[in-house]
Image (spheres, rainbow, N blue to C red):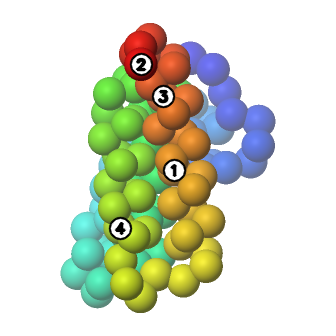
Amino acid sequence: MRKRNDGEHTYSTQNNIERSIKYFREYYSLSSKIENIEGLVDAPKGLGNCYMEIGDYAEAIKNYEKAVQRASVKNAGPQETAKKVEALCQIIKSHILKGDEG
């Protein structure tokens, strides 16, 4: 398992992906309850990053697509738009690493 060096997602950098996944799911659930757009984008993006680290590209793509979908809502601001672009780039990278053609 490779380790992230960019300081993102503390639990991930400690190679504790299962804990990271648990907390990102909890973050998403709480964000859904209070309709927190930032959390609805960040949580699936974080989950996607975790799944990328362990090589589960299909699950990473699924979560990045969810982040893109949530960042596309009407009241999303510039930060969410930037996160959408980042998630789209991660989708492309995931497809490449997965070996998808086309």
Query: Where is residue 40 drawn, in percent x and y?
Result: 37, 69
SS for tag 2? loop
Q: Amino acid at mark 3?
A: Ser
Residue 100 to residue 52: above or below = above
Q: In the rendered image of this protein, does residue 92 appear above or below residue 82?
A: above
Amino acid type of the residue that numbered disc 4 sits on in the rendered structure? Arg
Q: Nearer the viewer, residue 67 or 2?
A: 67
Which of the two discs, 1 and 3, labels the residue nearer the N terminus? 1
Q: Which residue is mark 1?
A: 87
Q: Nearer the viewer's eye, disc 2 or disc 1?
A: 2
Which of disc 3 and disc 4 is earlier in sequence? 4
Q: Report the Cα–Cα distance between label 4 and label 3.
A: 19 Å
Left or right for 79, reference 94: right
Q: Tell me the quadrant of the picture where the C terminus can be found.
A: top left
Which quadrant is the N terminus positioned in?
top right
Is label 2 in contact with label 1 (beta carbons under 8 Å)? no
- Above or below residue 25? Residue 50 is above
